[in-house]
Amino acid sequence: MSKKMIAALVLMVIGVIIFIVNRKPVEVDLLVTTVKSIQSFVFLGFTALGVVIGVLLK
């Protein structure tokens, strides 16, 4: 395994642990509306958005 693959796996494991631990309901204020969801789903959404932006910039 390459160093990049190991680093990616470690980051994914850390992300999964964070998603499992954070189960509180939160409100997210967007530009036009407010979204109420579980905190881990909000983290997952912003992580996915960051991955998409990273892929597009590559």
Image: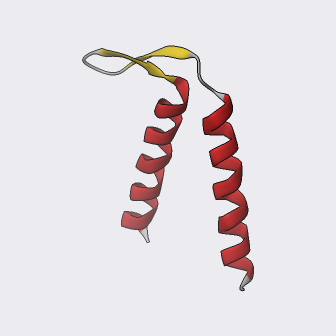
Q: Is residue 47 above or below residue 52?
A: above
Q: Position of residue 35 (x, y in %)?
A: 35, 18
Display colour scheme:
secondary structure
In the displayed structure, does residue 27 sit left or right of residue 21? left
> Residue at 75% across / 80% down in the picture?
3
Q: Quadrant of residue 18?
A: top right
Tell me if 37 is positioned left or right of 23 in this view.
left
**Figure quadrant of the C terminus:** bottom left
Question: Image height check: is 51 above or below 26?
Answer: below
Query: Is residue 16 placed above or below 25 in the rendered structure?
Result: below
Instruction: Write the residue at 69% across / 54% down.
Output: 13
Q: x, y (%) of residue 48?
A: 44, 49
Question: Residue sitting at 36 percent across and 65 percent down?
Answer: 56
Closer to the camera, 53 or 42? 42
| Position of residue 24 in the picture relative to residue 49 (left or right) | right
Spot occupied by residue 50 in the image (x, y as percentages of width and height): 47, 50
| Residue situated in front as seen by the camera: 19 or 11 | 19
- x%, y% of residue 8? 65, 67
